[in-house]
Image: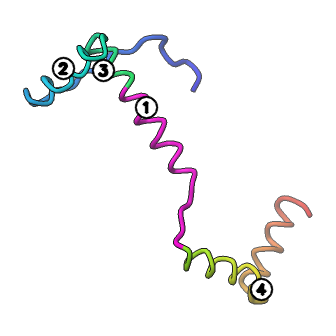
Amino acid sequence: MANLPTVARLEARLPGDIYALLKRAAEIEGRTLSDFVVAAAREAASRTIAETGVLRLSVEDQKLFAKAILNSPAPNAALRRVGRRHRELFGA
């Protein structure tokens, strides 16, 4: 993320009720509306990014995944070709 501005401007059009809700929440926390919105957006963005790095599986899916790893089939011809090609391009 090189060459990012130290400060950037973000504009948004909001329905009046959403604006009033945000303004009231900012007042309750003793923040400016801008500070409140930036903090909330940062928290939501961080949470979204963190959640994409976690794969959530049901218990049944966890069992199927483990079974597939522990009892994986032998590589077929296509997979062996890809393996050879990978070694040719990138070494052993």
Query: Disc 4 versus disc 3: distance between alpha carbons?
Result: 51 Å
Cβ atoms at labels 3 and 2 below 8 Å apart:
no
Which residue bears the numbered disc 3? 10
Q: Earlier in the sequence, mark 4 or mark 1?
A: 1
Above/below status of 17 relative to 92: above
Residue type at mark 3: give it: Leu
User: If you read the primary sequence from the N terminus, does the residue marked by circle 4 or circle 2 appear first?
Assistant: 2
**Amino acid tagged 2:** Arg
Mark 3 vs 2, N-terminal side: 3
Give residue 69's position: percent from left, percent from top. Answer: 73, 78
Q: Residue at x 79, y 89 (%)?
A: 74
Horizontal relation, residue 68 to residue 34: left or right: right
Residue tagged 2: 24
- Find the distance from the CA under tag 3 to the CA under tag 2: 20 Å
Residue 44 on the magenta span: yes
Q: Amino acid at mark 4?
A: Pro
Q: Main secondary structure of the magenta part?
A: helix
* Range drawn in magenta: 40-58
Q: Farthest right residue?
A: 92
Local crowd size for mark 3, using a 10 Å CA cut-off: few (<14), some (14–19), many (≥20): few
Residue topped by disc 4: 75
Q: Report the quarter where the N terminus lies.
A: top right
